[in-house]
Amino acid sequence: MQHSNAKQIPFAEFVTLIALLISLAALSIDSMIPALADIGRDLKVADSNDNQFVLISFLAGMGVGQFIYGPLSDSIGRKSSILLGLFIFALGALLSITADTYPQMLLGRVLQGFGLAGPRVVSVALVRDLYSGRAMARVMSFIMTVFIFVPMMAPALGQLVLTFSDWRMIFTGLLTIAIVLSIWFFVRSPETLAVENHRSFAPRQLWLGCKEVISNRVAMGFTLLTGLVFGGFLGYLSLSQPILQIQYGLGDRFPLYFAILAGAIGFASFTNTRLVGRFGMWRLTIFAILNISLSSLIYGLIALAYSGHPPLVSLLIYLLLVFFSTGLLFGNLNSLAMEPLGHLAGLGAGLVSALSTMISIVPGMIIGKLYDQTIYSLVGGFFVLMSLGLLVCYWLHRYGYSDTSE
């Protein structure tokens, strides 16, 4: 359902602006991937597998921040919360630009993640202020379609910067983008939270709101599903550079292959805008999780036949199948989790995003740390996580959730 104040700015501009605000987090992660080895070498990281903490620390900061920005936006408004987050991100970027030790780098990354939790979670609440139900799912899918072009290009942009400069210039570019987005958002975006819907930021009110969200079986079930899906994707992000660029010897062609695989997510998100009205979010979610689980089981057996190093073409086909399903899930799971939380949009969006992010970190780290120059940990991680996802779907269905619940 679309609400009366949904057209305060042109729809195309609204989708583009929200997509760029959300995608700044993806850009801050994916543009780092080509630079991980350089950062680790320059800052004297002993174990190369620990380079992934440049990504993990960012997500940890984001996970903590999302607990705060959701309810904060219910109190002071969506616009102020997003602008505050962009300011904190800028401070973190400055710390990383000037880092001469790995701890300082990680502190900067935590601040960056904490800051971008504002745009990431409050933008979803902002959309929920304007849309609900399948209309929200369609809008989020449009946003995801625009959003996906950023992570598609991010490694290539990072690689391009490294060709002419060093990894510090990547952070300088991120800082510049944040400043531009801050100005655009400040000038063009209205405040979507009505004054009568402001909620107190007092601890008691927050506790009551959190208790209501956490006790909602549907919201928490889809939050857990989101965390499992993103955990597998985080494992891929950690391993994409060592697997594709080093294990398979793609070298400078790595950003191109990364973009092609990311394009499957974008294509799925766009396709979801057409499919969701016909099949519903629940059916598409079941299909996508089942597809990843079965594909991973079959491909795991293929990988065993090649001692963990199957042909590149087969790996790309497998990953394209996985990421198409992942795109369907990204387009629907957030909307499914938020559907019963319309009256707590800010707090709900914060808790859903924070919990799903924190859930994803542990399996993502395990997948990355188990890497042994084969694809076993990546494929096995997808299989285990999506098998758990099927159990969550069964649990939701057992307690009465179905496509008629949307």
Image (cartoon, rainbow, N blue to C red):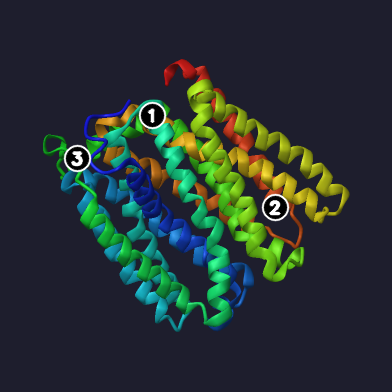
Pointer 1 or 3: first along the chain: 1
Residue sitting at the far left: 196
Q: Is residue 399 in view? A: no
Q: Determine whether 157 is above or below 119 in the image.
A: below
Give the CA separation, mark 1 to mark 3.
19 Å
Where residue 397 appears, as percent x and y from the top left, is 52, 20
Residue drawn at x 11%, y 35% is 196
Q: What element carries label 1?
A: helix
- Which label sits on residue 135? 1
Q: Residue under circle 3?
A: 193
- Of marks 2 and 1, which one's residue comes earlier in the chain? 1
**Quadrant of the image for the C terminus?**
top left
Looking at the image, is 89 positioned above or below residue 266? below
Secondary element at image label 2: helix
Q: What amino acid type should be assigned to the residue bearing mark 2?
A: Ser
Disc nearest the viewer among 2 and 1: 1
As drawn, the label of residue 377 is 2
Q: How far apart are marks 3 and 2 (CA)?
A: 44 Å
